[in-house]
Structure formats: C-alpha cells, structure tokens
C-alpha cells in the first residue's frame, strides 16, 4: 500500500496510481502542470526505478497514461510543447521504458496526441488519441481537428504504426476527442 500524505499532494490533488499486470506506476505531480516522470513498483511493492520522460526536442514530456507489457516494459502516452495556454503543442509520442528505467523507444505521433494506451497479449501497443489541427500563421491557440481522423492506432513493439481504426466521423460532433 502506498500512502501519500497531504503535503505531497499540492492543492489537495494527486494523480491516481496506475495498476497493470501487478505493477504500480505513480506519475510525478506538479501544481498546474502535467506529470513528466514516473515511479514504477514491481508486483511485490518494491520500487524498481524513477524515470523522467524526455521529448524529442529535449524538453520534459507531458505524461497522459502508462501501461505495462508482460516483460515489465512500461509504455507511456505523452505530448510535449505548450500546456495550459503556454505555447503551442509540438507533438505527441509513445515512449517505452525498459525494466531498468531507461527510455528505449520514442515513436513520434505528430499532432495526433495519444491519451490512453495498453499492450495486447501479442505485445502490440493500442492507443487512443486526438488529432490536433495544423497551426496556421497568427493562431494563438491549438485546436482539435474538426475533420475525420482515426481515434485508435495500433503500433508494433518497435514503434511502427501498423493500423488506424475507428473514424471520428462515427461519433456525434463534439463528442469524439479524448
């Protein structure tokens, strides 16, 4: 059991740990900013490692979700760039972290931002996300794409996109982003 005291939860809120295949993943909290690191505990409750997730541009990643594969590899859905009106979103990515806490793969997803992910028994990575529109000169805000795009993607364990599924157009307008 992990106890988190009130002093460790800025303004009374902490991210809920993720439990997957016996592992627990706790994302690092910050006041007014998304987590950029995580602590992973093995199925016996022993801390395995702490890791910071680094984006392709060298900045901290904004972690959105994590899952564990059967071999202990942790997959992370992330975005990077602007947050909370501070700059524009630069892109998204899927990151794989090995059992020693080393970032072993970063598969960029462009302005399709992963929100949730899981591993299938065959080690494929399934991801749900939202497409952000291309930026145009003078844009002061990022916008979710209003056209049609696939909400679900399937990736190989080496980061290759294998398929895109579930078109946004199947859902009522305004309800199909995550």
Image (spheres, rainbow, N blue to C red):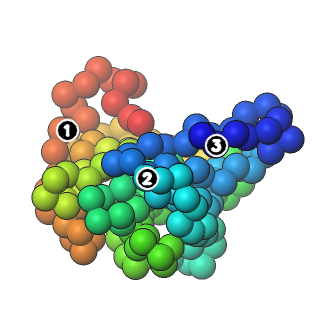
What SS does tag 3 mark? loop
Residue under label 3:
2
Q: Position of residue 169 (x, y in %)?
A: 22, 31
Residue 158, relative to residue 43: is it above or below? Answer: below
Q: State how far apart marks 3 and 1 are (Cα).
A: 39 Å
Q: State how far apart marks 3 and 2 are (Cα).
A: 13 Å
- Sequence-first tag of 1 and 2: 2
Is label 1 in contact with label 2 (beta carbons under 8 Å)? Answer: no
Q: Position of residue 147 (x, y in %)?
A: 30, 40
Residue 64 shows in the view: yes
Rate crowding at label 2 as few (under 14), some (14 to 19) or many (20 or more) other CA atoms within 10 Å. Answer: some
Is label 3 in contact with label 2 (beta carbons under 8 Å)? Answer: no
Residue under label 2:
43
Name the image quarter holding the C terminus. top left
- Sequence-first tag of 3 and 2: 3
What SS does tag 1 mark? strand
Residue under label 1:
167
């Amino acid at each position: 059991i992990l106890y988190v005291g009130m002093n460790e939860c800025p303004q009374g809120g902490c991210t809920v740990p993720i439990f997957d295949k016996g592992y627990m993943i706790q994302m690092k909290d910050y006041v007014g900013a998304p987590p950029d690191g995580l602590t992973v505990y093995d199925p016996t409750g022993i801390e395995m490692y702490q890791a910071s997730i680094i984006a392709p541009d060298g900045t901290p990643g904004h972690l959105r979700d994590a899952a564990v594969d059967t071999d202990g590899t942790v997959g992370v859905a992330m975005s990077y760039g602007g947050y909370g009106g501070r700059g524009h979103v630069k892109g998204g990515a899927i990151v794989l972290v090995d059992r020693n806490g080393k970032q072993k793969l970063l598969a960029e997803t462009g302005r399709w931002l992963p929100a949730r992910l899981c591993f299938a028994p065959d080690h494929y990575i399934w991801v749900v996300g939202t497409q952000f529109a291309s930026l145009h000169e003078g844009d002061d805000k990022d916008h979710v794409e209003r056209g049609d795009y696939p909400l679900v993607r399937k990736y190989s364990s080496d980061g290759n996109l294998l398929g895109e599924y579930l078109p946004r157009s199947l859902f009522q307008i305004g309800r199909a982003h995550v």
